[in-house]
Amino acid sequence: MSIDRNYEIAKELYAAYGIDTDAALKKLSEIPVSIHCWQIDDLTGFEDFNAKLSGGLATTGNAAGKPKSVPEYFENLTQAIKLVPGKKKVAAHAVYLDNGGVNNIDRDAIEPKHFAHWVEFAKKMGVGLDFNPTYFNHAKAEDGFTLSSNDEGIRRFWVEHGKRCRKIGEYFGKEMGQVCYTNHWIPDGYKDITVDKLGPRKLLEKSLDEIFEEKIDPKYNVDSVESKLFGLGSEAYVTGSHEFYTNYVAHKKNCIICLDAGHFHPTEVISSKLSSYLAFDQEIMLHVSRPMRWDSDHVTILDDETKAIMEEIARCDAFDKVHIGLDFFDASINRIAATAIGGRTAKKAILLALLQPTKELQDAEHAGNFTKRLALLEEVKGLPFGFVWAKYCDMNDCEQDDWIRRY
């Protein structure tokens, strides 16, 4: 077959630079990518298929094909997952519950039984599960505050939601036999000039302490907290800033940091931040997306930053410490294809990172031979990566490019 013949050519060419393509493929097969469930339906969820996003979230576009029922949703998600080769997880959100036809199950009353359909789906598909509380799209989040609300009733409501989501994460972990990462992101913040910036952050600290008070075995559930620079309606101030969560994680040691590629200044990148956390042996959860001028959550592509993120993880030998998840939603293109494109891109970026002569590059750098370092980095760009990718797709019985014609 041409795939095998091309791979043997690529293998020989890479070997000339000391790169073992077989080892790279084996390593890639061990690295899961967590595919977010919400691209399939514009983050609507199952509470209300006509729900409108709030909390600074927006999905733009009006492409046909948004699922109108739970069965149709899972059929579409299945198609997308099958197009992403290799080891995978699916990240669910709390609004994707099975309420059994009971419409008044509020966020502070959800239980593991309401997410048994996710376990059934994951086992059928052979994927792991991650989870996300939904601290938005709710009447008790309309004023822009949840865990840092100065209304004690509202704050307590969302604390209870967070606690219950951790138990769902633990349930996922036990059922799937692997860690579930439960990621907490809140929309809290002010639109305009903010006078009291400390007060809400003290309330957020209190809320997180209460949510994480119960000890859960980390082999089942690990919590992460996700920062943001600004949002729609919180342009002036966000309670859960990068600095707040970095300090909270370092001091409390009851959760890990989540870095979202779109949640920083336009010229600020998360690839440059990873080693600072890894230097202190910290775990990191990633949300890999593509910000275009701002946190616009475009579909992940093989751009410089996506490649740089995976290169940094590979160079730090930290695929066991950095957990790769996706987060984007685009309603202007086919939602199944968008999910597949992002998932396949993440896998490609990881493979590209594994196909670098990392040790030789580091040796040259340590020896002060920056000429060799630059020359090597440039020369390997011309190696036939596509042949190795095609081999990986073939190994995993996954279409390489024929699928594109369906969309």
Image: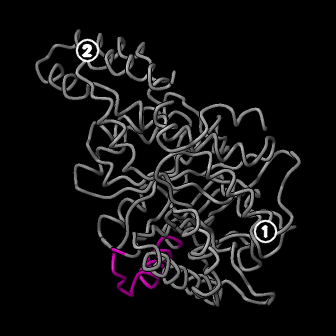
* Residue at the spot of label 1: 71
Q: Nearer the viewer, residue 370 or 238?
A: 370
What's the magenta region?
Answer: 200-219
**In the image, which disc is placed on residue 403?**
none
Callout 1: SS: helix
* Dominant secondary structure of the residues highlighted in magenta in the image: helix
Please name the residue shown 40% across and 73% down the image: 177
User: Does the segment drawn in magenta span residue 210?
Assistant: yes
Which corner quadrant of the image does residue 343 belong to?
Answer: top right
Does residue 385 lie above or below 72 as drawn? above
**In the image, which disc is placed on residue 16?**
2
Q: Nearer the viewer, residue 382 or 405?
A: 405
Horizontally, residue 373 falls left or right of residue 9, namely left
The disc labelled 2 sits on which kind of residue? Ala
The disc labelled 1 sits on which kind of residue? Pro
Please name the residue shown 49% across and 76% down the image: 172
Please name the residue shown 59% across and 57% down the image: 237
User: For the C terminus, which image quadrant?
Assistant: top right
Judge the density around disc 1: few (<14), some (14-19), many (≥20) Cα neighbours within 10 Å. Answer: few
Q: Nearer the viewer, residue 351 or 187?
A: 351
Q: Position of residue 362 (x, y in %)?
A: 19, 26
Q: Position of residue 89 (x, y in %)?
A: 51, 59
Which corner quadrant of the image does residue 251 belong to?
Answer: bottom left
Callout 2: SS: loop
